Image: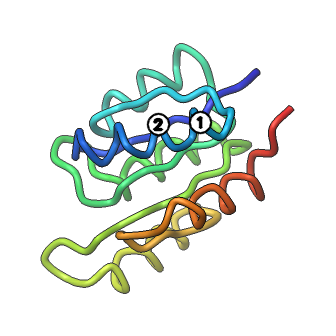
Amino acid sequence: MSYILVVDDDTNFRQMLCQTLERAGYRVVEAEDGNVAIKACETEVPGLVITDIIMPEKEGLETIQEIRAKYPEVNIIAMSGGGRISPDSYLPLAKGLGAVKTLQKPFRREEVIKAVQELFPQE
């Protein structure tokens, strides 16, 4: 069974999202930034990547571009709560770079589960 890679620098949010997905029956791997995410992909290609946009080290837009270039078959969900500007600015950029879906933080657990089920149905 393939897995979902969750990329977010906010430890509490990342762990909450991973727990939500695990309770829904998915295998999840977590990464605190884009560099760790790319290394995880090199070890085993995920079935789905859920990445934040604003992160230190390698941020989400660059991560999306790199994953899309190396692993074009992987679906990507981009999420953002904003940063210096509103998520309305970052999320369309993420979609233009290859994210299939976007989620604006904060979002409800049901929203992320629905998005995941559409892109990564359980086997």
- Residue kind at label 2, given as amino acid type: Gln
In the image, is 111 to the left or to the right of 105? right
Determine the image quadrant of residue 54. Answer: bottom left
Residue 94 percent across, percent down from the top left: 46, 68
Residue 41 percent across, percent down from the top left: 52, 26
Vertical placement of residue 39 versus 37, above or below:
above
Q: Residue furthest right?
A: 123
Q: CA distance from mark 1 to mark 2?
A: 6 Å
Q: Sort mark 1 into few (<14), some (14-19) or many (20+) by Cα contacts within 10 Å.
A: few
Q: Report which residue position mark 2 lands on.
A: 19
Residue 72 percent across, percent down from the top left: 68, 45
On-image quarter of the C terminus: top right
For image coordinates 51% across by 35% down, the residue present is: 5
Vertical placement of residue 113 versus 14, above or below:
below
In the image, is 63 to the left or to the right of 3? left
- Find out whether the residues at labels 1 and 2 contact each other: C-beta distance under 8 Å: yes
- Residue kind at label 1, given as amino acid type: Arg
Q: Residue furthest front?
A: 23
Q: Report which residue position mark 1 lands on.
A: 23
Determine the image quadrant of residue 22. Answer: top right
